[in-house]
Amino acid sequence: MTETEARAQRIGAPVLAVEEVSLTFGGVRALTEVSFDVREHEVRAIIGPNGAGKSSMLNVLNGFYQPQHGIIRFRGREFRGMKPHVAATMGIGRTFQNIALFRGMTVLDNIMVGRNLKMRGNLLQEAFWLPAARREEIEHRRAVEEIIDFLEIQHIRRTPVGQLPYGLQKRVELARALAMEPSVLLLDEPMAGMNLEEKQDMCRFVLDVNDHYGTTIVLIEHDMGVVMDISDRVVVLDYGSKIADGTPDQVRSDQAVIDAYLGVAH
Amino acid sequence: MHLLYSIFVDPFMQMGHAPDLLVQTLWDGLVSGVLYALIALGFVLIFKASGVFNFAQGIMVVFAALTLVGLNEHGVPAYVALALTVVVMLVLAVAVERAILRPLVNQPEIILFMATFGLTYVLIGLGELIFGGDPKVMISGELGLPSGSYRINMLGGYVQLQKIDIAAAIIASLMVAGLGIVFNRTRIGRALRAVADSHRAALSVGISLEQIWVVVWFAAGVVALATGIMWGARSNVSFALEIIALKALPVLILGGFTSIPGAIVGGLIIGVGEKMGEFYWGPLVGGGIESWFAYVIALVFLLFRPQGLFGERIIERL
Amino acid sequence: MAADIGALDTFPKLLLHHAKVRGARPAIREKDRGIWQTWTWTQLADEVRVLACGFADQGLKRGDHMALVGDNRPRIYAAMCAAQCLGAVPVPLYQDAVAAEMAFPIQNAEIALAVVEDQEQVDKLLEILPQCPTLKHIYYDNPRGLRHYAQPQLASYDRLREIGSEAAKRDPGFLEREIEKGAGDDPAAMFFTSGTTATPKGVVLTHHALIDRARAAAEMEGLTDRDVVIAYLPPAWIGQNIFSYAQPFATGYCICCPESAETLMTDMREIGPSYYFAPPRVLEALLTQVSIRMEDAGRFKRALYRHFMDVARRVGGAILDRKPVGMAQRLHYALGDLLVYGPLRNVLGMSRVRVAYTAGEAIGPDLFRFYRSIGINLKQLYGSTETSVFVCVQPNGQVKADTVGPAVRGVELKFTPQRELLIRSPGLFREYYKNPQATEQAKDAEGWFHTGDAGYLDADGHLKIIDRVKDVGRLDDRTLFAPKYLENKLKFFPYIKEAVAFGHARDRVCAFINIDMEAVGNWAEKRKLAYTGYVDLASRKEVRDLITQCVEQVNADLAADPELAGSQIHRFLLLHKELDADDGELTRTRKVRRGYIAERYASLVEALYAGKESVHVEAQVRYEDGRTGQISADLSICDARSFPPAAAREAA
C-alpha cells in the first residue's frame, strides 16, 4: 500500500460544508453564493488571488463574520451563522494570517490558553492550588508538552512570544490551535512571509498534524505552489465566487483558474 | 536666595528636627496612597481586559458605598447588606456588559469612553433616586471595622496610627494578593491576560469575551466597594468622593495603564508625595498643594516617561 | 603488556555489576516533554535485557555488526549495550551524515540490523537500501511520520521490545549465559574514522582497551558515581562514547541527554555537569556568545566585565593551579568571582564543573586561558579513535596552554626522526576492519601506533603537538610553515569562523577566511551596515578592513616568534560561502580538509599568488535539503602588512 493510498483510505464523509454563502460589507460583496464541503481527515485548500475572499470565507467558518445568506453545516448541525465560541467548542481551531498571539505571555502560556475549553477546574480550587487543580494543571501541561515536542519548539518554551522571529511565532500559533484538540483546523496563510526552508517545515508540520492527529485541515494560500503538493482537494475563489473545485491536478489545468492567476480581465 | 533656601533646605531641616512628624506624614501619605491605588486598580483591570477607559470607576466607589449604607438604613443588617451590595455589583457588571459593551464592541475606543461617561451619570442619578443625595455615615462599626488609634512613642515624639487605616492597608494588601493569584494561577486569570493581549486569538480558542467582561467589571466593582467602605469610614459617603476618585488618573499615568503593580506603586507615590508636599512645602504657597500636586507629578511623567513606571514601552513602529 | 582489568572485563558485565551495587542510582537522564526522566542502573539493565533478547530473536549473533544512528538518547545507549551482551559489535554512525556516507560502513561491516532515532534516519537508510542488501532490520525509536511506511525491514523500537519481552520469558537465563561468554579481548565497538583520506576506516576497539583507558583517566581525575556528564556530541565520535558510555560504565556516574541541540544551554544549566568535555570550537562559540552579549550590555556592566577579566587574566590561572598569589590580588579575584566569574560560569552551565577537557585540535591559548582564568578547570588531552582517547592528559596544577600534558598511566611514547609521534598503550585498537594493509601501516610489528602527528616532549615531559606530519611544510626558502598553527591563530578572533592557510613550497603564506556570520553580522548592525546575507556581508569593504586588522595582528604576533616569523600571512580573501561538512570541505568533526579545499578552489589559490586584485568565482553549493544551487561572485583579494622578525627589529 503506498502512502497516497493510505491517506485516501482515511478520508471520510463531509464534516463541514457551506451552502450558497454570501457576505457583504456595506454593499461590497466579499463572497457570492459560495458552496463547498470538507471531508473528514482531508487537507482542503482554499486558494485564490489576493482579495478573492479567502480570509472572509475562513472568518465565516469560525464565526467571526456572519453571512447574510447561506448556511454552514458542521457535524450534522445547521447554522445560519457561526459564533466563535460555538465553533471553538465544537472543535474548530484556527490560526491567523497576521499572527494573533498573546504577546505578553510565554510560549508555554500561549499554548496553555489553547487548553481553555478543556479545563474544568473551579476558581477556588485553582486559587488555593488544591490537589485537584494541581492534577488538572499537570494533565494539561502534559498535553501541551506533547505538542511542544511535536512541533519542535522545546527551546523556546519559556520565551515571551513577542521576542520570537516570525516563523517561530507561526509555529506557536499552530501549537496553540492544536492544544484545543480541534477536529477541524483552519489555517489562514500558514506559509505567508516565510522563506523556502520555513515553508517546507510548515508543510511537513501540517501534513504531520493531519496524519498524526487525524485533524481535518482547511488552509488558505494565495501562492499555488506549496499548497498543491499537500492538499487533497482545492477550492479556487476569485472576486468572492468559486471558480473551480477539485483535485490539485484538475484545478491546475482549469482554464478559469489559469486566467484568474494570470490576471485576465473579466 | 531666601526662596531657594525655603524650597531646598528648610523642609529637609524640618524633617531632620522632627523625625516623628516625618514618619506621621509618611504614614498618612501611604494610607491615602493605598486608596488611590485601589481606585486605579479598578481602572487597570477593566482597561487591560477590554481596552475601555472606565470613567465611571470613581463613581462606582461612591455607588457601592451608598448602596451598602442605604441598604443598612433601610433596616438590612450590616453583613447582609454587604453581601447584597456584592450582588448589586455583579448585576451592575452584567448590565454594563449587556447594555454597553456588547452592543458597542468593535467601536472606536472614544465611543466606549463616552459610554462610560454616560454610565457615570446613570449611576449618580440612580444613587440619588434610591438613597437620596445627603451625605451618609459609613457603617464601619456595624461591619466590625476597628476605630480609635494607636499612639506609638518614637523618635523623641509620637506617631498616631488610626486603627481603621491599618485595617484598610491590610484589606487592600489581601485584595491585591488575591487578584494576583487569580490572575496568574487560574484558568480565568490566564484567559483574562489572553483577552488583554488579543481579542481575536482569545475568541479563536473559545474564550468568551462576554464572560471575561462580566468578570473584570465585577472584580472592579468589588474593589470599588472595598475602597468605598474604607474611604467612607474616614470621611462621609457622598458624591463629593468622586473628585478624589479622579486622583486615579495621575496614579495611572505614573504606574502605566496596564500594570497592576504600577497602579499600586503609583498610588503610594502620589499619596506620599502630596502629603509630604502639603506639609513641608505647602506653607510656601499658602497651602492647598494636596489638590494639584498629583497632577504636577503626572505631567512630569508624561514628558519624560509616557509609558509610566511599569507600563509596556510605547514603540511606534514604522 | 595488557594491564589486568579484573573480572568485570566487558561492558555488559559492568552493567550487571552496577545494577547490583548501585541499582537505584541514576544511570541516564533524558529531558523529555520538559521533564528530566531518570533511568536507574536497574532500569537500564532491564531495558538492555529486553533488547538483547529481541536482537537475538531477530538473528543478531556473536561477531555480527549492528548500526546505531541517532542523537544521544538512552535507548541508543541501551541498544549499544544489548548488542555487546550478545557479543555483537555496535557501530555508531554520525547522525548528521548524508545517506551516501552511511552506505560504506554498512556495506563494509555487512550490517544486518540498525537501530535509529527517527524518520530522518529511516529515510536515509531506505535511500541506500538498494546498495546495502545485507540490511534486513531497521528499528526506529520515534514513530513520528512513519505511520504509513510499509517497508518490510521497518519496525518500531517498541515492537522490538515486545519481541524481546516474549523471548526473555521463554528463556530467562539466556542473557546471563550470553554475557558470561564474553571476554575482554572481544571487540566492543567499531568507530568509523571521519576519513580525511579517501574511504573511512572502521576502527575496532576491544572491551579491554576501552575499559582500561576509561579507568586510567577516571582514577587520575578521581571520578566517582556522583559525577554527572551532559551527553551532547555525536555518539559516533569516540570521545562522546568514552565520556558517555565507557567511563560511566567504568565508574557508575550518570549521563544526561539534553532535550534538543537548541535547548543544550538551558539543560546544562539545570543539570550542572561536574565533568565536561568540549572541543575547542564549542568553547569558542560559547565565548563568542558571551562576548557579543557583553558588547550589548550597558556601559557599567561592560566596564565591570573588562576590569575583572583583566584581573582574571593576571591571576586566575595561578589561583586555579594553587600557585602563590598575593593576598590583595586574591581578594580582588574573589570579588570578581562574586560579581563576574561566578555568574559567568553559571550562564555557561559550568558552575559545578570539576574537570573539563578539550581536545580534537589545538586550542587558541587565549581561549584556553579565558576558561581557566574564570575558575573552570579546563585541561587538554591528547588521543584519537585508535588509542581509545586517553594518551596524554594534563594533570591538575600542571596545565600549560601549548602542550597536552604527560603520558597517562600505561602509555609509552616515542618519536621518529621526522618527529612523528608513536604510541604503545593498552588502549590501542585491534585493527582497521577488513583492511589489513591500513592496519599494518598504522601499527607496526612491535605494536607501535603511528599517529601521523608531529611533535616532541618538552622539558617537563609534556607532549607538544605542532601539526600533522604531512601538513607541516616549508616555504620555498625552507622557512617552517605550520598551517594549522596559523589558522588557529586567525580563528581566535570572534569575527573569523574558519581559515585555511597555504604556503608549502610557495614564496609566502596566503589564506582563505570565512567570516563568522553571527559576530560580523552583529558588528555590521552596530555600524548600521545593511546586508542581505553571507555573500553580501563578506564582500563589504568595511568587513574586509576589519578582517585585515585581525590578520595584521596575527602577523605582529608571529613576528615575535623566531621560528614562525617567516610565515606571516601576506594576502587573503574572504570566501563566498561557508565551508561545510556537507560539501566535503570540513570533516564531520568540523576540521578543515585543506587538501580538498586547495583542489576545489585551485583558481582562488592561484589568484592569491598571482597577485590579482580580485577573482571571479562560480560555485555549486548543496543546501540542507539536498538540492544544489549556483553562486557567482567577485571576490576581492586583500593584502596584509607583515612585520620584520623580532630578532631583526632588535638588531636594527
Image (tube, coloured by chain):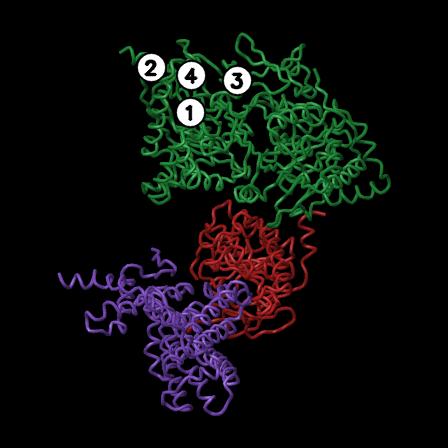
* Residue in view at x 45 percent, y 90 percent: B73
Residue A72 visible in the picture: yes
The chain that appears red in the image is A
Marks 3 and 2, the one that precedes in the sequence: 3
Structural distance between the alpha carbons of marks 3 and 2:
28 Å
Q: Earlier in the sequence, mark 3 or mark 4?
A: 3
Q: Which residue is mark 3?
A: C462
Q: Which residue is mark 1?
A: C489
Q: Chain of mark 2?
A: C
**Disc 4 is attached to a residue of which chain?**
C
Residue C503's label in the rendered image is 4
Labels 3 and 4 within one chain:
yes
Front position among marks 3 and 4: 3
Mark 3 Cα shell of 10 Å, populated few (<14), some (14-19), many (≥20)? many
Q: Which chain is purple?
A: B
Looking at the image, residue C312 sits to the left or right of residue C407; the answer is left
Amino acid bearing label 1: Lys
For the point 54% across and 17% down, which residue is it?
A: C453
Q: Are marks 1 and 4 on the same chain?
A: yes
Residue named by callout 2:
C645
Give the secondary structure at mark 1.
helix
C500 up-or-down from A19: above or below: above
